[in-house]
């Protein structure tokens, strides 16, 4: 019974050895000759199982691993150890090497003591480890070259967040060594200027609330510089088992923020300058219009009175003189008209009565000059616009009408003035061919000027395609005082 059980176990063991992917080699403790090797060993070493029996392990160990092998065998033989492990390379029959992790046992239970070599081919694991090492070193190389600090935060539901990784640039960017920041990530928060902290915390809370990204721009205090530095943080979240990982980058924005501030400053200066130029131009126009009207008009009136006196006193038998004087009187009338036209062009008198009469007058002139009919609607009550806003609105309508005449090929225009609670909305719609791209060599300052004028007054202007056809210019301009619209 016992012997049949032993026989069963023997068969089982043999089957295991046959099928195992682990190399098992038994070799004589004295001669080191291989007594038995399983198929996995033969397969790994590229030998026929029988051929292996003529060899010793030294035949497939490269010279550099033999010394360690011998030392181990000696320890085992002297009973200093019963088994021991070793990482070595084995040489295949074709000379190529592969790494193995091997355990060697010493057994003196049989008539001849043997060593048992049990080894696993770890080339796959080794390749994976090397690939991992490469990708880690690649990642470090890439991270070292990005112009900012990379970091990774791990967030678990019931634990405080931990800084899993922070790149060396932290020293340069924040003045804190990566290792120091790693240990105390809260040091970053302490750098943030007090007034920027609420915004930082608000963004953080949003990201905690499920936003997949966390973007923040703010200022930190750099002790070493004794100055402020602008930084931008960009983080994206991803799930991992049991929590989230925040992959982030922090960039130094100081230069671009300074450039942005400089740009805004220059833009504001430019706007102020443009507004100043416009206002000087308007004053000049007003002045010229008055000169033409008062001075020139006054002189012309005097001439006209003089001529009519002459007419009355000329002897009736001097037809040539009478004819000449009548001709001069006619020229004076024409000059009157011209002076009036010039003064109106410079500054329409209708402007003195408010924006509605002024644009109505301009619209009539437009139709008269272009034969394009118009529709006009405006509130009946006076619109409380300041004098600057009135002139700006008028000039904008004037330029928009000029654009219709120049570019639109329209057959109708519609001007609407609508009183809103705090502002006046003016829309000019044409039914022309739609907004045309400005010619490449054209200067095209009209629309820019309109936008600038509107912005200077705290309003806004857009030029866009009209609903059905053509172009619409839409202007919103704040009222001087916000009086509730009586119609509401
Ligand atoms: N009502 C419109 N219909 C069609 N195209 C238009 C209309 N208004 C403007 N455009 C197009 O927009 C361009 C820019 O207009 P903008 O008034 O800025 O310049 P401009 O009229 O060409 O030159 P400037 O006004 O400086 O004399 C025009 O060249 C034209 O192509
Ligand atoms: Mg124009």
Image (cartoon, rainbow, N blue to C red):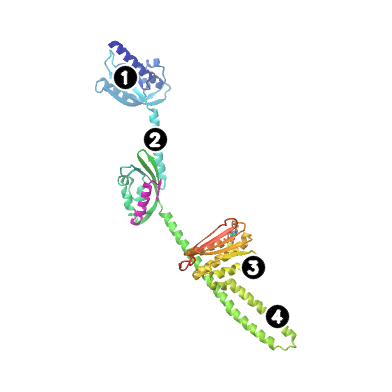
Q: Which residues are magenta?
A: 192-215
Residue under numbered circle 3: 368
Apparent side of residue 189 relative to residue 285 in the rendered image (left or right): left
Specify which label sits upstream in the sequence, 4 or 2.
2
- Quadrant of the rendered image containing residue 86: top left
Depth order, front residue of 335/280 = 335
Residue under numbered circle 1: 116
- Percent across and percent down for residue 427 are 55, 62
Q: Does the magenta-highlighted stretch encompass residue 242? A: no
Q: Residue at x 32, y 13 (%)?
A: 8
How busy is the neighbourhood of tag 4: few (under 14 within 10 Å), some, or many (20 plus)? Answer: few
Mark 4 → mark 2, Cα distance in angstroms = 104 Å
One can see residue 443 in this view: no
Disc number lying in front (4 or 1) = 4
Residue under numbered circle 2: 132
Mark 3 → mark 2, Cα distance in angstroms = 82 Å
Disc number lying in front (3 or 4) = 3
Label 4 residue SS: helix
Q: Are marks 3 and 4 in contact (CB under 8 Å)?
A: no
In the depicted structure, whether residue 422 falls above or below residue 11? below
Specify which label sits upstream in the sequence, 1 or 2.
1
Residue under numbered circle 4: 327
Q: Quadrant of the N terminus?
A: top left
- Percent across and percent down for residue 433 are 62, 57
- Quadrant of the rendered image containing residue 410: bottom right
């Amino acid at each position: 019974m016992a012997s049949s059980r032993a026989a069963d176990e023997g068969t089982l063991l043999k089957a295991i050895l046959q099928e195992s992917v682990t190399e098992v080699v038994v070799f004589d403790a004295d001669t080191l000759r291989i007594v038995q090797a399983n198929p996995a060993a033969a397969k790994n070493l590229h030998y026929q199982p029988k051929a292996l029996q003529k060899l010793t392990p030294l035949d497939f160990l490269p010279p550099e691993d033999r010394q360690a092998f011998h030392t181990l065998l000696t320890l085992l033989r002297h009973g200093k150890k019963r088994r021991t492990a070793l990482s070595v390379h084995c040489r295949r029959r074709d000379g190529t090497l592969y790494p193995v992790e091997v355990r060697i046992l010493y057994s003196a239970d049989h008539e001849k003591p043997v060593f048992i070599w049990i080894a696993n081919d770890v080339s796959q694991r080794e390749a994976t480890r090397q690939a991992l090492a490469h990708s880690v070193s690649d990642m470090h190389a890439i991270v070292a070259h990005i112009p900012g600090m990379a970091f990774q935060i791990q967030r678990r539901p019931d634990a405080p967040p931990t800084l899993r990784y922070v790149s060396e640039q932290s020293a340069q960017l924040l003045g804190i060594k990566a290792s120091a920041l790693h240990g105390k990530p809260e040091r970053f928060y302490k750098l943030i200027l007090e007034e920027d902290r609420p915004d930082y915390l608000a963004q953080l809370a949003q990201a905690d609330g499920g936003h997949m990204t966390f973007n923040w721009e703010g200022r930190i205090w750099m002790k070493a510089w004794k100055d402020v530095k602008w930084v931008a943080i960009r983080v994206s979240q991803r799930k991992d088992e049991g929590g989230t990982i925040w992959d982030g980058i922090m960039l130094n924005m100081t230069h671009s923020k300074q450039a942005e501030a400089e740009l805004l400053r220059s833009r504001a200066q430019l706007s102020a300058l443009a507004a100043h130029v416009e206002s000087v131009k308007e004053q000049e126009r007003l002045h010229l219009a008055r000169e033409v009207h008062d001075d020139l008009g006054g002189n012309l009136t005097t001439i006209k009175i003089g001529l009519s006196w002459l007419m009355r006193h000329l002897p009736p038998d001097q037809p040539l003189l009478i004819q000449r004087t009548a001709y001069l009187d006619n020229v004076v009338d024409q000059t009157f008209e011209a002076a009036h036209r010039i003064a109106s062009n410079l500054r329409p008198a209708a402007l003195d009565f408010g924006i509605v009469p002024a644009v109505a007058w301009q619209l009539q002139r437009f139709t008269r000059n272009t034969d394009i009919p118009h529709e006009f609607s405006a509130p009946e009550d006076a619109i409380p616009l300041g004098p600057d806003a009135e002139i700006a609105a008028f000039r904008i309508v004037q330029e928009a009408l000029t654009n219709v005449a120049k570019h639109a090929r329209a057959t109708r225009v519609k001007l609407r003035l609508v009183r809103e609670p705090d502002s006046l909305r003016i829309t000019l719609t044409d039914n022309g061919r739609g907004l045309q791209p400005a010619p490449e060599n054209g200067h095209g300052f009209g629309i820019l000027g309109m936008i600038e004028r509107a912005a200077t007054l705290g309003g806004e202007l857009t030029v866009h395609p009209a609903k059905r056809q053509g172009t619409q210019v839409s202007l919103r301009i704040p009222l001087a005082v916000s009086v509730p619209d009586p119609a509401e």
